[in-house]
Amino acid sequence: MKLDKLVGDRFKEKPADCVIESHSLMLRGGYMKFVSSGIFSQYMPLKRICRKIEQIIREEMDAIDGQEVLFPVALPASLWEESGRFESVGSELLRFKDRNNAPMVLGMTHEEAAVQLVREYGISYTRYPFMIYQIQTKFRDEARPRAGLIRVREFTMKDAYSFHTSQEDLENYYKKCYDSYNRIFARAGIPEVVTVKSDSGMMGGNVSHEYMLLTPVGEDTIAVCSECDYRANMEAADSIIVNTPDAELAELTKVETPHASTIEAVCDFLKSSVEKSCKAVVYQKNMTDEYVVVFLRGDIEVNETKLRNYLGEEIHPAIITEESGIVAGFIGPKGLDNKKNTIVFDKSLENLTNFCCGANEVDYHYVNFNMERDYGKVEYVDVAKIKEGGICPVCGKPTISVSRGIEVGNIFQLGTKYTKTMGMQYLDKEGNLQYPIMGCYGIGVGRLAASVCEAHRDDYGPIWPISIAPWQVHICCLRADDEVIKAAADDIYNTLLKKGVEVIYDDRDVRAGVMFSDADLLGVPVRVVVSPRSLGENMIELSTRDKKVSKKVPKDQIIEEICALIAELQREIEEKV
Amino acid sequence: MKLDKLVGDRFKEKPADCVIESHSLMLRGGYMKFVSSGIFSQYMPLKRICRKIEQIIREEMDAIDGQEVLFPVALPASLWEESGRFESVGSELLRFKDRNNAPMVLGMTHEEAAVQLVREYGISYTRYPFMIYQIQTKFRDEARPRAGLIRVREFTMKDAYSFHTSQEDLENYYKKCYDSYNRIFARAGIPEVVTVKSDSGMMGGNVSHEYMLLTPVGEDTIAVCSECDYRANMEAADSIIVNTPDAELAELTKVETPHASTIEAVCDFLKSSVEKSCKAVVYQKNMTDEYVVVFLRGDIEVNETKLRNYLGEEIHPAIITEESGIVAGFIGPKGLDNKKNTIVFDKSLENLTNFCCGANEVDYHYVNFNMERDYGKVEYVDVAKIKEGGICPVCGKPTISVSRGIEVGNIFQLGTKYTKTMGMQYLDKEGNLQYPIMGCYGIGVGRLAASVCEAHRDDYGPIWPISIAPWQVHICCLRADDEVIKAAADDIYNTLLKKGVEVIYDDRDVRAGVMFSDADLLGVPVRVVVSPRSLGENMIELSTRDKKVSKKVPKDQIIEEICALIAELQREIEEKV
């Protein structure tokens, strides 16, 4: 490929709305173009990167007996009604009507389509286990698309679905897939991806893992223990708070706390520690607007995902009206209407003694409140966010640190949620009807490309791993107007092409600076520079994009050296798989 | 791949709603499953066929300097508003609104997206010509999906867009693409595909060609000259009618023709030839309901596509009301209101003398009508259907025959329709702003697969060309319960896999009949049968799916013979490219 014919512009200026580097570099390098919020077209370099990623995924899925299939992008709503998700999923599910007014959806995940495809096939236990996967366009009508290819509305995804006759068999396969995913990320050049325990969210099921590329610009928050292997998405991380009860319970007293309507202000006024306080956070249920009051220790935050899972329904931050009877800023357990409102006590209050809390009266709080004595016995549940320095739920040490990461893949043990709702059954050995157990496994192709770009770049552009680079070799011919220089560069280009090497060749009549900055933006791992100075010494410059290799090679050895360097870069990646 | 693990059922019964064989065979062979009208999921065999077709297309597009890109499936309506097609295209364009109520469409073709992608890139003549293409899912909300993969709503398509600075350059590229398409169809195993001149329809532009697989079950109708190279889609074929004027014009007479309201009945009643009559066919314009009256010779039919193109707007068959003033069954030129109605005279009336036609009065016709004398000078236009035995517009002989075909691809010279409406311009050598000239080139992947199936099959299943077959070799192990037989078959399977041959291996414990009928449905070109009888003679049975080869091969030569047969089948295809 000649660079002067490559469609797409490369430019220097960082676009204004880019919050992360991969977004900026992919626009600046002519990888993609904005079409609409969260929707991009891809130019050739990105398309080539994605094709290579897809091929790696395909090979690894085939290696664990996956069968590549294809589901539709546009699906009849009836399928999603069968599973119940047509109602339960929010407005990220794009619903529309066709010309005959039939309700349809754009597939954002394909559990329903997978069950529909194999419902009749899977009627006997002898046909299990099996796994089907596709690599296909998906649409998820995100409220806030952002960060380039990290959070988009339309994306290419590999989604796989496995079907089993026992939990044990699912777990065996889940483990295979777990390893397969590690191989995929290593082959794509980011072996540093870690797995974290995750929340299954709208997918249903119990055990699930996310594959995270840890990076400060990630939009996921992860709790990582520095002492043991524990890693979990904040949404799923158990919060452990240990309170040491005071030896004696002091007398409950109602005190005036004028204008102190935040827990910090109250504690400040009372000169007590926030760790000895109980605060309230109020939500409303989406369906009924009923209030949900969460009580938790003053220094702890609510984990809305865990709260949502506990309640089993969608919630939003409350708008507290006068008629509600809730006294915002002074809410406490004692005297709060527990018929009208759902009250949740977080585990952070367990064993907390002599604490302060609201008195449900403007400008009044209680001090020396003790839950059992002053309110009654309650059930404590974990709806809190784990925090930096928190206690690890596995090793028990206060060694939790909070990192950020990009989710590059996820795997779920779905159980029978979809097979039950959609009536997929098989006859077991004994002739009894059973529901197959499912697993599902996703990787976003574009997001993976962007993640690799985040992980491997410098100030000037991406540094693509050779396994997914748009080309393997980038030739710069400085002074293409000089016949000798041009002939030498042409010769290298043509020889490499004949050997099947993927080459991008820049023989434009532009300044060396422009050539190099374009080459940096394209991020091709092996660079060959044919320049008057080196060629004068009968040498060609050979380097890697990451500058780890940078040398002059005698002209008659250049092809051999290029091929050796490509092989070396490939070996480096394979060693980490 | 072991056949017993292949997801998907094969069965014998022909599904009720299949009008063509490929539809039936693809359902019966476990290639695809119905999801919704015109929407299918693909099982592994079809997905593999489509992937191979896609790879052939990709290689041929790359060979004519195409750059693979990717456009979105979901596009903002604003892009289609720019080109004017948001309004002009009918309800086959699926329009919907996203969560923010922004109007969007599902891409059914991507001219707008292509222009949007390169509008800034193509600002200088030096950057031309270039071609970009994608292989991507499309959605077209067809009124009547039918015939399996032939007319669907969702499909995978390769669509390519080229950009040029002169008509001459476009034509040169168009010719390249024309040849490239012939190579693609030959490589996919249907070199018999022919090109026909076509109507550009809603795409705009002038010259266009369709690639047709001639088959009686095709839904397109094609006029083919048996004497010269002329071939055209009926929608686009010029109709040539030669009338020899009578020596003398007879006297115009109004005659009573009671109850004769069809042209045949009138001619029958008047004992005159239908070729000496003028009939009227009435339409209404979709936008205004205004009537369009087409006069043409009694034996000729209206070509609605040509009429639509002539009028420049959509029409539908008329509902003639009393208030219209039109006397259905007795319509004639003389006395018809040509202010209120649009009147069109087809060329088939040119030089027609002494003919009969309606008198715009119930139960009355004229005889010996002569257009110029009795009505006035009119402009004749060609809005008629060419017919069997008609005159070839190229060689002038009455040698037109009408065939049916499946359109497997099309190419269009678009001109500047999209670049003008969407404001894409470049600076030419002289510094003047110009609009680039476009071409576009499409192939439906699934439809091509179905067409190959139509062209290459027998009563028992498809006969896939080796270039796109889901597997190259199908091994049947009869009596897998016999250790010796099983070991021999396993050995062939494993040896072929090691050699990189694509093999499907049937070692199920089923009757030979079931095995062979499944093999026929999968249509794999090379079949290897390991049976007790042959193996007793130390022989293995080797055949092709089309039965042209069927022989016994000594066991120790079987691998060599299989590989030679694969090579031979590949050569046969390449020879026709």
Image: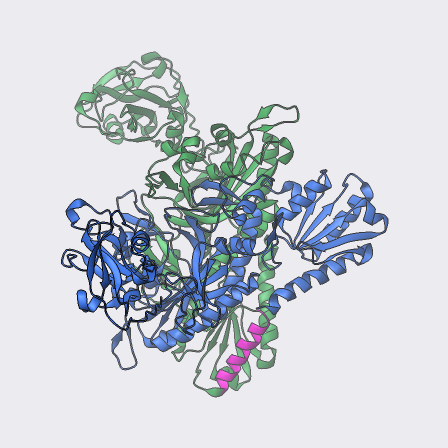
Chain colours: A green, B blue
Q: Is residue B378 visible?
A: no
Q: Is residue B214 above or below residue B171?
A: above
Q: Is residue B385 magenta?
A: no
Q: Position of residue B497 (x, y in %)?
A: 69, 53
- Point 63% across, 27% down: residue: A428
Tell me residue A10's x, y (percent): 36, 67
- In the picture, measured across the screen, residue A149 lies left or right of residue A438, that is left
Front one among A6 and B89: B89
Q: Give the extent of the magenta segment.
A: A484-500
Reply above or below: A370 against A110.
above
Residue at x 47%, y 44% (from the top left corner): B40
- Magenta: main secondary structure equals helix
Q: Position of residue B279 (x, y in %)?
A: 28, 57
- Residue A498: in magenta span: yes
Q: Position of residue A220 (x, y in %)?
A: 40, 43
Q: Is residue B39 visible?
A: yes
